Amino acid sequence: MQYNGLDTIHIAGHHNHASTKAEAFLRRIAEIAPGSYGIMHIHDDEDPKSVNSFNKLTLKRGKIEESIDNDLSPYIPVLEDEYDQTRED
């Protein structure tokens, strides 16, 4: 797809389990199109090292940098409240 005359790839997904396909695709883009740029957010609540945070993959100049996204993390309480198991609905 093109926007303003430039080839553009838009990836969106909302999986309920870990998947490496989108991350591998981003890494492939970095290899074949080193002028590309973009950001991918990953929230894997089953990964012990990132259970309460969003990981951010930043693609620029053919390289990918991994970091914690401080605007969306910590997941609780920034985006959601901690689940209260004692509440009655």
Image (tube, rainbow, N blue to C red):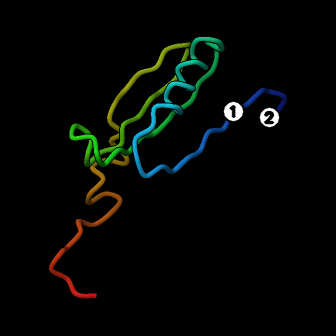
Q: Position of residue 25 (x, y in %)?
A: 57, 26
Residue type at the position of mark 2: Met
Q: Upstream in the sequence, badge 1 or badge 2? A: 2
Q: Around disc 2, counting alpha carbons within 10 Å, would you say few (fewer than 14), some (14 to 19), or many (20 or more)?
A: few
Q: Around disc 1, counting alpha carbons within 10 Å, would you say few (fewer than 14), some (14 to 19), or many (20 or more)?
A: few
- The residue at the far left in this view is 86
Residue on which the image places disc 1: 9
**47 to 35, vertically: above or below:** below
The residue lying at 19 percent from left, 73 percent from top is 84
The residue lying at 48 percent from left, 49 percent from top is 15
Residue on which the image places disc 2: 1
The answer to which quarter of the image holds residue 53 is top left
Residue type at the position of mark 1: Ile
Q: Quadrant of the C terminus?
A: bottom left
Q: Going by the image, does 60 lie left or right of 33?
A: left
Q: Going by the image, does 31 lie left or right of 73?
A: right
Q: Position of residue 23 (x, y in %)?
A: 49, 29
Q: Which of the numbered marks, if any, corresponds to residue 27?
A: none
Q: Position of residue 47 (x, y in %)?
A: 27, 40
Q: Is the C-beta separation of discs 1 and 2 under 8 Å?
A: yes
Q: Going by the image, does 7 lie left or right of 60?
A: right
